[in-house]
Image (cartoon, rainbow, N blue to C red):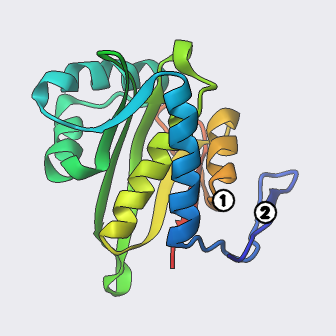
Amino acid sequence: AVVSTQSTGPQGDVDFGLKKCVNDIEISTQLSQLKLACEGYGVELVQYENENTLARIIELITKDLSEPYSIYTYRYFIHNWPYLCFMAKVEDSIVGAIVCKLDIHKKGNYRGYIAMLAVDKEHRRKKIGSSLVQKAIQTMIEHNCEEVVLETEITNQAALNLYQQLGFIRDKRLLKYYLNGVDAFRLKLWLK
């Protein structure tokens, strides 16, 4: 794997380093380790099953994300890419969720997109978020994905740290990207 170091300057300019490539073995190994960590907390990762869980997913995500999404946005992702929507469950309660998509990007390459990730506050610091992201990435790889992107607020240090630990780099700064006027970083992970 090629490791990238990246930092932001005083004006938030991004210093682009070498891209980071992650191979299938690294993803599988990391996912196995995270799965064991989650199981230690009684957490089970499951794929989206049906409309009955949609209300809880929306509730979880609405608490944490700054953008209000309509029911149609959730349905767009979940109905088109149900195999890229995962939930973290403790007993019968959904305590985390990730919603993604995968489609063809420039030059015919498959690009994954992480649209939403949320973990209930009472269940954070248990590797649930990392496990959900890794599970989604592993599934994307199985569908020939070459890169994964997402956006997050530049002020969301927890998200930036989580994705950086998983190998994502800051690809671009998007000025006033969110409705609240906050800038975003586009984060990218190269898989091939």
- Label 2 SS: loop
Closer to the camera in the image, 72 or 1: 1
Q: Tell me the tag on residue 170.
A: 1
Closer to the N terminus: mark 1 or mark 2? Answer: 2
Q: Amino acid at mark 2?
A: Gln
Q: Residue at x 73, y 77 (%)?
A: 18
Q: Nearer the viewer, residue 144 or 150?
A: 144
Question: The disc labelled 1 sits on which kind of residue?
Answer: Arg
CB-based contact (under 8 Å), mark 1 and mark 2: yes
Residue at the extreme right of the image, as rendered: 10
- Write down the quadrant of residue 95 in the picture: top left
Q: Which residue is mark 2?
A: 6
Where's residue 189, x and y in %?
A: 56, 65
Q: Is residue 58 above or below residue 81?
A: above
- Quarter of the figure with the N terminus: bottom right
User: Element under label 1?
Assistant: strand
